[in-house]
Image: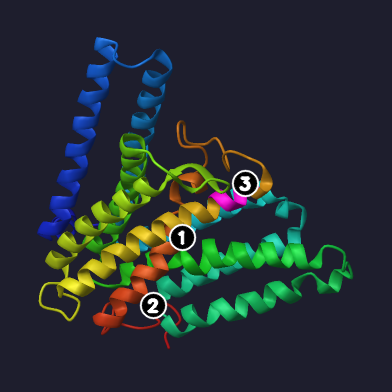
Amino acid sequence: MQWPVALADPVTRGILAAVIGVLAVATIAIGFVSVTGLASPVMRRELWLRLGSWLVLLPLMLGPVLAGRVWTIGAVTILGLVCLREFDRATGLFREPIITATVAIGVVMVNFASLDIWYNFFVALWPLSVCVIAVASIPADKPSGYIQRVGLGVLAFMLFGAGLAHLGYMANDPGYRPIVLLLICAVALNDVLAFTFGKLIGGPKLLPHTSPGKTISGAVGAMCGTTLLVATVAHLIFNGTRLDQAIWLILLGATVSVAGQFGDLTLSSIKRDLGIKDMGVVIPGHGGVLDRFNSLLLVAPASYHFIRYFTDFGAGQPMRVITGG
């Protein structure tokens, strides 16, 4: 870890300064409504809980990104396993230890491929892991429930392994910090904008049976705001590359927003199907870890491949630095 290297990029410094500024303004605003009594006691408690959670979450999210690629990939691995744990408990997949263990090994392996900078193995692990999950429980000679446990296992690996691991693989590019920081902050802003526009404008519900609190106005407002932010910052990051054209920058921003909202709706669909409100209670005011990081599950692979299509993102780096290919 070398702080001068981590903070050398002006976009990285700008994102960090913006995050600190937003937290400071939020603290002042919540303090003001608390002192003046503009919010009810219940609302004040909820606001302070959420702010406190962010004050803990943001260093845990941004710290590994600044610390280096090994720390970033390690953090993504732990995040994937924690999300898998919550998913297993909520869906009952934990009752199938063979499938659970197979998925966990898949999550570790795909992140090891990231750490090794072994892209071919990283890509191949998606279909290979699905095949292993499909056959893992067959020797137990228990065909009852086969489709359900394999389906849950494949979905879990796709989301918490193959999908989320793309966020870690980005760290193999020397200039990964501003990109990863932008994605993390953009999905957080996406949620805030959707909530804010939905409350201020209201109107028809987006998908009332899937997520009763979401409105069409919130979804559109979030897409406009997040697209503008991502396009503007991405212009600074990818200046001079093929991606640095208005149409592609706007499309990248829209991809981040739409993928983020669908990631949230994917988890909402799972929770509604299970009849639960949150996947856990680890984070006060937010629910479980999976409730907070669901947007990244789809944003990470979508944005990675979009960026890689237009740029030499991660190209030219040493390959198989551990296995020595």
Q: Mark 1, mark 3: which one is toward the viewer?
A: 3
Relative to 205, residue 72 above or below: below
Magenta region, residue range = 268-272
Q: CA distance from mark 1 to mark 2?
A: 20 Å
Q: Mark 2, mark 3: which one is toward the viewer?
A: 3
The secondary structure that dominates the magenta segment is helix
Q: Secondary structure at mark 1?
A: helix
Q: Residue at x 75, y 76 (%)?
A: 135
Amino acid type at image mark 2: Ile
Q: Are marks 1 and 2 in contact (CB under 8 Å)?
A: no
Quadrant hosting residue 202: top left
Location of the C terminus (image quadrant): bottom left
Task: Say few, some or many: other residues with alpha carbon within 10 Å of mark 3 (under 14 / 14 to 19 / 20 or more).
Answer: some
Location of the N terminus (image quadrant): bottom left
Whichever of callouts 1 and 3 sits on the residue coming sooner in the sequence is 3
Q: Which residue is mark 1?
A: 297
Q: Secondary structure at mark 3?
A: helix
Q: Is residue 271 magenta?
A: yes
Q: CA distance from mark 1 to mark 3?
A: 18 Å
Q: Judge left or right: residue 127 versus residue 111.
A: right
Q: CA distance from mark 2 to mark 3?
A: 38 Å
Amino acid type at image mark 3: Arg
Task: Say few, some or many: other residues with alpha carbon within 10 Å of mark 2 (under 14 / 14 to 19 / 20 or more).
Answer: many
Q: Position of residue 193 (x, y in %)?
A: 31, 44
Whichever of callouts 1 and 2 sits on the residue coming sooner in the sequence is 2
Q: Mark 1, mark 2: which one is toward the viewer?
A: 1
Q: Which residue is mark 2?
A: 117
